[in-house]
Image (spheres, rainbow, N blue to C red):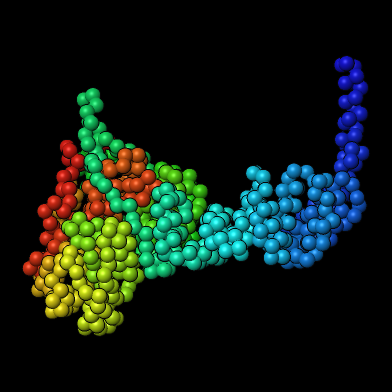
Amino acid sequence: MHRLRALLLPVIAVLLLAGCASLGGPTPAQQAQAAQAQALDARGDYAGAARGWLDLAAQGGAAGDGYRLRAAEALQAGGLGGRADAELTLVHRSRLGAGDRARFDLLSAERALARKDPQHALRLVAGLPAGLSPDETLRAQRVQALASAAIGDRWAAAVARVRMESGLRGAAATANQRALVSLLAGLGAGPLKQRAAALPASDPMLPWIGRALAKLGTALPRSLPELASPVGTQVAQGQGALREGYRAYQRIAVLLPQSGPLAAAGRAVRDGFLTDYFESARDGQPRPLVRFYDSQGTAAGAVTAYRQAVADGAQLVVGPLAREGVAALFAQPLPVPLLALNHPDNGTSPPPGSAEFALMPESEGAQTAARMLADGLRNALVFHGDDDAAVRAARAFAAQFEAGGGTVIGSAQLPVGSVNYASAIRSAIAGGVPANTGIFMAVRPEQGRLLLPQLRVARLRQPAYATASVYGLRDDPNADRDLDGIEFGDAPWLFDAQPGLPSRSELSGQLPDVDGRAARLFAFGMDAWALVPYLDWLRAHPGSYVAGATGQLTADAQGHIQRVPLWLRFDNGLARPLAGGLQLSPPAGGGTEP
C-alpha cells in the first residue's frame, strides 16, 4: 500500500501542475479570460464583462452555466435587463453548485420584480439560503422592500428597509431612510402607534416609527425614568472604602467642535467638563488623562477624531456634540465605547456598550405631561412657538399626555412676529375648557411674558406649565413677574440646588458661559464628566442615578441617558425650586472616589 502511494503521488502532482483541464476544470487560458472579465466588471464595464463570460460559456464544459449566469449578472448591473432575461433562460439551474443556485434565484427575483411580478420575486427571495454574502443580502433585502411595497404591504417593506440600513452609506443610505419614513407615514398615526406598543423597547423599528410620526405631526410616548438609589455609595473594603459602581479609566478622549459654527457650544461643554473634572480631585478621586480632539462639528470630523483617539489609546470616548456626527459614529464599528453627547438624526440607539446623553426637547415635553397628570389634570391646552425645539416638545407633550389618559382639548402655534396672541388663544379654546384643565407652553421667555397675561385676560386661570426655555438663565424679576405661577423643569445646578457640585454662584464671573446663554451647555458638560465612571453601573442597575447638574441621570437598557429635572415655579419674578421637586442628597459619604 505504501509502495502504491509512492508511485501515485508523482502522477497526481504532474496532473495538478498541468492544470485542471485534464480533470474537467478551466484551462490556464480560461482562468486568464475569467480574471479579465472580473476586472472589466470591477471597472464598471459590464457589457465587456458580459462578452467575456459569454465567450467562456460558448467554449462548453461543466462551468458553462456558471459563466452564463455571471454574464446575466453583468448585464443586469449594466442596465440591460432584457438581455439578462434572455441569458437566464439558457442557464440550467440544476447544473449549478449550491452557491450559484442561490445567485441564480436572487437574480431571477430581481428580474421578476422588473417584470412587475412582485409575488414571484418574494417567493424566490423567501427560498434563499442563509449565508449569503453582504452584497447578496443587501440585494435580497432590496427586492423584499420593493416587492412588498408593490403589493401594498408597507410594514413588510419598511422592515426590509430597516435591515438594509447597516449595509448602506452616503446617498444610498439617505434615499433608503427617506423611503422608509415615507412607507411608515403612509400607514397613518393610529396604526403606527399600535404597532409601536407591541414592539420591545430595543426594536430597531421604533426610532423610524418616531420619525414617521413626527412627519405626521405627532410622536410616541416616552418611557420615563424611575429613580431608585444614587450611585457612589461607600462600600467598606479593608482599611479603606470604595464607591459602589465606580470604574476608573486611565485615558479618555473628548470629541468636541473646536472650530466651525459649533465651536462656541463646544467651548461651553468643555469648560463644564473640566470644571467638574478638577473639582473631583477634592475628594481624592484619581483622574484619568483627558485629551480633547476637534470634531469640527461635522460627521467626517467626528469619525476622524474618534479613530485618532482610538489609535492614541483612549479607553472611553466622550462626544461628539453634533447630531450628524453621532449618527456617523453609530454607523461605524466602535472598538472603544462611546458616550455620545447628542441623539443621532436617524434616531438609532447606541451600539452595544456605548451610550448617548442629550438635552432633548421631547424629554421636556414628556416630563411636563407626566407632571400635569400627576397633579390631577386630565385636559390640556397647548401653546408653542414656531422653532424646531418648541414644536418637538409640544408633540412629545401631547403624545405622553394622551398615553396617560389625558386629552389635549386645544393647541395653537404662536404667530411669528406678533405680540397679540388673542386669535391663537381663541382657536385653542374654541371647543370649551372643561374642569381639570392645565396649560402647557413651549415658549421662549419673551413669548411667555406676553402669553400668560393674555391668557389671564381671557379668564383662563388654569395652572400653567412650561419647558425650560421659558427661563432666560438669569434672574430678571421685573420682566419675569409676568411669568408668575408657571411651573417648569430645569437643571438644578442653575439654581445651586444640587449639593456636591461646583456652585454656579461661586463660579459666576470667572467663566463666560456660567452666566450666559450657554449655561445649560456648561451644566451638560459637567454631567458628561460625572457620568464617565458610572456608565456600566447605570446600564446594569435600572433606577440607579447620578445626582447631576442637569438633573438626576439614569440609563435605560439601550444606553439612553435619561434626566429627571428640578421643578420650579416663578414667584415674584424669580424661579424658585418647589419642595420635593428633586432628590437633593449627594451619595452617602460625600464625593466620588474609586
Question: Is 97 or 10 nearer to us in this picture?
Answer: 97
| Residue 39 rendering spot, x and y as whole percentages | 76, 56
Question: Residue at the location (18% across, 58% down)?
Answer: 376
Q: Looking at the image, is 91 positioned above or below residue 242?
A: below
| Residue 172 rendering spot, x and y as whole percentages | 57, 63
Instruction: Determine which quarter of the picture holds residue 152.
Output: bottom right
- State how many labels appear: 0
| Quadrant that contains the C terminus | top left
Question: Residue at the location (10% across, 72% down)?
Answer: 481
Can residue 577 be seen here? The reply is yes
Question: Residue at the location (92% across, 22% down)?
Answer: 7
In this picture, residue 101 sits left or right of residue 219: right
In this picture, residue 335 sits left or right of residue 422: right
Question: Residue at the location (72% across, 56% down)?
Answer: 107
Question: Is 199 or 341 nearer to us in this picture?
Answer: 199
| Residue 10 rendering spot, x and y as whole percentages | 90, 27
